[in-house]
Amino acid sequence: MKPNCRRICDLLAQYADGTLPDSQRGEVQRHLDACPPCRVIAGKECGARQLLRACADRLRTEPLPPGLRTRCQALAGEQTTTRAWLRPSMRFAIAALLILLVGALLSIVTRQSDALLAAQLTADHIKCFGLFRPTEGKTLDAEQAQKLLSDRFGLDVHVPPSSGQEDLSLLNARTCLYADGRIPHLMYEANGQDLSLFVLEGETRAPAELTAFGHHTRIWSRGGNTFVLITPAAEESVADAARYVAAEAH
């Protein structure tokens, strides 16, 4: 990816949220008009935001994390004058609580909605392959990937290795933001198609299969963890590789 494309991709979250200043928004729009790959990534980013907004009504009926409402009410009760709200320390505390509230609510919805989980991880799949695909022909040994995830992130993850029989190559191992932390993201290529395996440690879900943003999402749990496999929507060409990864993941 070109340096300018990488810089534009860093702005796409704000672009999708509509929070970019007009000057930067115009720059991003001009780049997207001239760059089809970045335009595809922007479309996925905007689609994910639309899905989040569509799910917003569910937040009204979801319980807040224990203690969060009490902390917010206590903070408000302590401030009896307008001047108190203007203190820098108070503005910082309010901002921190707002960040905590938004993160907690999104965490609740994501954990309960398979559709939102599929959308979020499909967006990560697209962005990671756009930004962090290794150079042509470069692959990663499964043991190296396991050691990388353990040494760098403290994660104990079994990594399905490459398989010549299924024309499957392990390309990269990273982590992506999810809920309150980060989750392992294993990046593969099979028959020229991109595959992603995400591991949600300590979380279990009922099996599910969904389509999001032109990709197929398969969700299942095993051994107390949940696995999410992202493949092309028309996955006939990678069906054997997908079955292999699903069988090897544990």
Image: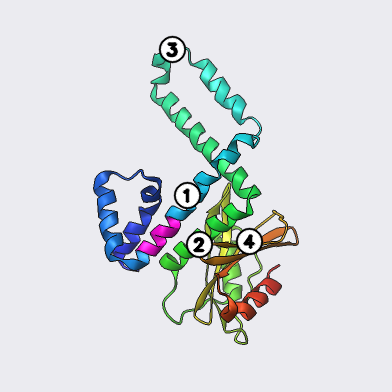
Residue under the image location 63 percent in, 50 percent down: 113
The residue carrying mark 2 is 213
Q: Is residue 171 above or below residue 26?
A: below
Residue under the image location 60 percent in, 58 percent down: 154
Neighbours of disc 2 within 10 Å: few (<14), some (14-19), many (20+): some
Residue 236 sits in which quadrant? Answer: bottom right
x and y percentages locating residue 23 in the rendered image: 24, 47
Dot 3 or dot 2: first in sequence order is 3
Residue 115 sits in which quadrant? Answer: bottom right
Quadrant housing the N terminus: bottom left
Q: Looking at the picture, which amino acid does disc 3 mark?
A: Thr
Residue 16 visible in the current orientation: yes
The residue carrying mark 4 is 199
The residue carrying mark 3 is 81
**Pointers 1 and 4 in contact (C-beta within 8 Å):** no
Neighbours of disc 4 within 10 Å: few (<14), some (14-19), many (20+): many
Q: Which residues are magenta?
A: 39-45
Q: Looking at the picture, which amino acid does disc 1 mark?
A: Gln
Dot 1 or dot 4: first in sequence order is 1
Left or right side of 40 for 146: right
Q: Which mark lies nearer to you, 4 or 2?
A: 2
Quadrant housing the C terminus: bottom right
Q: Which mark lies nearer to you, 1 or 3?
A: 1
Dot 3 or dot 4: first in sequence order is 3
Classify mark 4: helix, strand or loop. strand
In this picture the colour scheme is rainbow
Left or right side of 229 for 85: left
Q: Which mark is residue 50?
A: 1
